Amino acid sequence: MTRDKIANQHIGMSRRGFMKALGASASAAAIGVSFSGEAFAQQAKVVIGTWGGDYGKLLTKNVETIFLTPKGIEVVQDQASDAPRRAKMVAEKRLPRGTTDIQALSSANIYEMQEAGVLEQLDWSKIPNAKNLIPTMKYPYGIGQIYSGKVIVYNPKMITPAPTSFKDAFDPKWGNKIGIIDIQYIYVFVAASLAATGGKSGIDIEGAKKVLLACKAGGARIYPTNEAFAQALKTEEIGMGIMWKARAVQWQNAGIPVESAAPSEGIPLYISGFAIPKNAPNKEGAYAYMNAMLEKQAQEAFAVDMGYNPTVTNAVVAADLQKRIGFTLEEQKRLIDLDYAFLAKNDAAMKEWWDKVFKA
């Protein structure tokens, strides 16, 4: 199977395709390349673009300190949200040398940057641990590091009976008990579309708009960030919304009274991964970083620390933790990948409507 075919399979919104890939063993052959400290001693510095915050700290703890520092690789984190980092990559496109060696991006953003022509096509011989990747997490221009799914989060004391669908999550009858996160407008559109269509493939923008406007008219509150939304859940200003299951687990660990429910219409995937800019000054160091993040130990640590699922088949997650962060076999059948091409094409129009109509 060619890499382009793998990419095409990944881009479509296909439950069957994801499940087939999830259950399959990694197809790439093991490559006999050594990542010894001696081989990378000359790589003085690797600059990684990342969101920073807790995620940046966990990269340092679980990847950099354990697997790269002993090899003489110094890591510098260029911390910013993904939008300015993506804009910077495009602005640096004409330069022979960019300012970062590897970038942390969502799978949707990897697709966008691939289309912009700023990413390096990966040389799998330089990523030995890629042999363990779930095939769906392996793209021509990037890899998935961790994944979760969009679910309904709710306070069982405030929301009864428990919601079972995105239709329930946007039901205007709940009034101002519903919270919606501004920065997640794309994923809110996807969830609202599923609510409007009952789970049919494809994204129904107009149907999503009707669902969202009815929800807003009922009194739904809009919060600027994930953190503001979490605080509203904690104080019981709201009792329900949508969020990645991994984040819900983090909130539970922090004592916020929420449960999660997998929506009946389908569970949109969130995949966080890494890509290498085409003009990265230190590509060998970037490959070393990419390989390190796929180490079994690093993947297992992220499952414990962040509540996200590993993307390598050799990672082992304790049964009690897997029950909290993962999905049952029945729920896995409802996991759906996003149509990145469609979202990239319609992003500007959706954002304009969101800002000028929905938030007005």
Image (cartoon, helix red, strand yellow):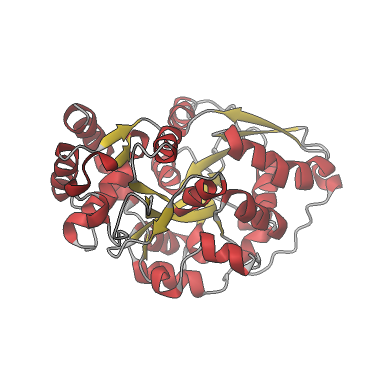
Residue nearest the observer in this picture, 34 or 79: 79
**Quick check: 261 left or right of 356?**
right
At 40% from the left and 40% from the top, the residue drawn is: 233
Residue 61, position as x, y percentages in the image: 72, 42
Relative to 225, residue 305 above or below: below
At 24% from the left and 62% from the top, the residue drawn is: 201
Residue nearest the observer in this picture, 305 or 80: 305
**Quick check: 343 left or right of 316?**
left
Relative to 129, residue 49 above or below: above
Q: Is residue 77 visible?
A: yes
Q: Is residue 344 visible?
A: no
Residue 310, position as x, y percentages in the image: 58, 59
Residue 244, position as x, y percentages in the image: 43, 50
Name the quarter where the C terminus is drawn: top left
Quarter of the rendering containing residue 13: bottom left
Residue nearest the observer in this picture, 155 or 15: 155
Number of numbered discs overlaid on the protein picture: 0
Quarter of the rendering containing residue 101: top right
**Quick check: 76 left or right of 343?**
right
Residue farthest to the right, as pictured: 38
Residue 49, position as x, y percentages in the image: 57, 33
At 31% from the left and 62% from the top, the residue drawn is: 266
Residue farthest to the front, as pictured: 157
